[in-house]
Amino acid sequence: MMKKKKLFYILCSVVLFISFILGGFCGAYMYKKNINDEAVSNVNSFANNDDVKVSNKTNIILSTIYEKSGDCIKDKEVNGKQYSGENRKELEKSFEKEGYVVEKMTSSEISMKRAINRYAPNRYIVGIKDGYIAIFKTDKEGNEFIEDSSNDITKIRTANLKQGDIDLLQNGSKDFEFNTKDEAFSKLEDYI
């Protein structure tokens, strides 16, 4: 009889402990979900606020999203004086040629972004050149070029790679973007 009581108490303790842990996880999940929902709601209310107008004191931040790597880099900040009195649509029309659109807009600060299908500027990229894996450099605008064709185009044929790797090398991935040429060459070890 004593063994059954001990077993009963142990089982009850385990069940209570598991219930406590699950309750904590559920509470944390609901809390995070609520915080995220509020953040999304706040961003959407700013982003969709067409009543806000640019003033002389408005700070306009222009950024570029480099789609191949996912990097977002601030291009410049502009004083709103030149655009004073413009609403969201008028401001987007003013920056239409450069491709910027309003992401967030308040009377004191406006965030405008554009997306381009390139890697970030001044980086080294592992990519494909004429059927071979190569190391590219990006210029200040993200355009890719080969610095030294005798060293930067490898003898590694893309025909020997999996189709998934070929697609990533062609379409771009943060995994193939590096700050230095040495880092890019280190990535090549994955294909040797």
Image: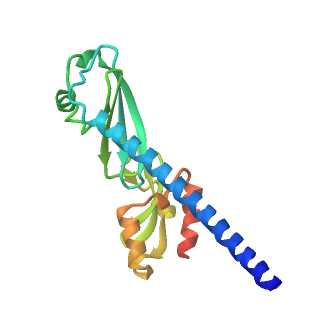
Relative height, residue 53 to residue 172 (above, below):
above
The residue positioned 40% from the left and 75% from the top of the image is 164
Query: Which quarter of the picture shows residue 160?
Result: bottom left
Q: In which quarter of the image is the N terminus?
A: bottom right
**Count of numbered circles in the view:** 0
Q: In this view of the protein, which residue sits in the foreground, 18 or 53?
A: 18
Determine whether, in the image, residue 24 is placed left or right of residue 120.
right
Residue 28, position as x, y percentages in the image: 54, 53
Q: In this view of the protein, which residue sits in the foreground, 188 or 52?
A: 52
Residue 137, position as x, y percentages in the image: 45, 52
- Point out the residue furthest to the front here: 1
The reply to whether residue 103 is in sight is no
Query: Which quarter of the picture shows residue 83?
Result: top left
- Point out the residue furthest to the right here: 2
Determine whether, in the image, residue 23 is placed left or right of residue 91.
right
The residue positioned 41% from the left and 76% from the top of the image is 158
The residue positioned 24% from the left and 39% from the top of the image is 99
Give the color scheme: rainbow, by chain, secondary structure or one colour.
rainbow
The reply to whether residue 159 is in sight is yes
Determine whether, in the image, residue 44 is placed left or right of residue 128.
left
Residue 170, position as x, y percentages in the image: 36, 66
